[in-house]
Amino acid sequence: MSRTASPLVLQHLTKSYGNSRGIEDVSFSLRPGEVFGFLGPNGAGKTTAIRTITGFMQPTSGSFRLLGASDSEAQRKARARVGYLAGDIALYGRLTGRQLLKYLAKLGRDADWQYVAELERRFEAELDKPIRSLSKGNRQKLGVIQAFMHRPKLAILDEPTSGLDPLMKQVFYEIVRESSADKRTIFVSSHDLSEVQKICDRAGFIRNGKLISVETIAEVMEYSTHQYIVEFAKKPAKTMFDKVDSVQEVHIDGRTMTVTVRGEVGEFVRELAKHKPVGLREHELELEELFMHHYTDKEQS
């Protein structure tokens, strides 16, 4: 594969289960060195797509190229240069983490043991304990380490920060940014928009098995939706933000106003300050709510 070739290309990829479809006609490609987010609600088809790409499932139709390989035998060999973290980590419970990493190296991964030691230190990982004795967070650390142990050209990570505490999430974000700076490509599946915004260059949005759009994070930020709960000393007027273009919806319940703002929030904040609220907090929208606000329109169009 040349340095400029796409590390991963999906072309009309479909995976059906009986009469239902896990993914339908999904097409996109990754750029070398980018961090690509694959975003959607739980059950949207993210894991089905990943398990098809990584060879655990056969596509019903369509095709994909993995590190330039398009036939099954070439893809099998290419997977030695791919890092993979499953959403449901099934690790060998009787082994220690270190024994597992050595076992994976024997299966063909060209492990960088100096880098493994660095990851062990940064993640404060417990590699010498039996895997079955580890907490969810420590198993997840091990999963991340095994995905990066051979400095893969492409890392495919399904919900990689599940179970990690905030400090360890920051360590993970640093590892991803460093890998990208080293021209290694990262494919991150997530249902957490804020996480994707932190680390990704672009994101593909999937819902009900269909790819709705692929956009840069800058484009996502332009219409990023925020919701604020505002308390006033007395019942506010619903027309308060009529002249603020970014305000999409206003609901009032007594002295409480719920305001939905899309894109830049500065104008909303300046107007709000004129009315002297007594309380303000942001309600973090769930991804499904974000789809309702924006992506449903794209799907219909």
Image (spheres, rainbow, N blue to C red):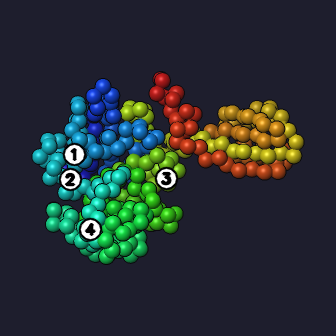
Residue on which disc 3 sits:
195
Rate crowding at label 2 as few (under 14), some (14 to 19) or many (20 or more) other CA atoms within 10 Å: many
| Mark 1 lies on residue | 55
- In the rendered image, the residue lying farthest to the left is 73
Spatial CA span between label 1 and label 3: 27 Å
**Is 174 located above or below residue 37 in the figure?**
below
Query: Residue flagged by tag 2: what amino acid is it?
Result: Arg
Q: Is residue 293 above or below residue 1?
A: above
Labels 2, 4: front one:
4
Q: Is residue 245 visible?
A: no
Quadrant of residue 61 in the image?
Answer: top left
Along the horizontal axis of the image, is 70 left or right of 137?
left
- 1 vs 4, front mark: 4
**Tag 3: amino acid:** Glu
Does label 4 or label 3 sit earlier along the sequence?
4
Which of the two marks, 4 or 3, is nearer to us in this view?
4
Q: Circle 2 is placed at which residue position? A: 79
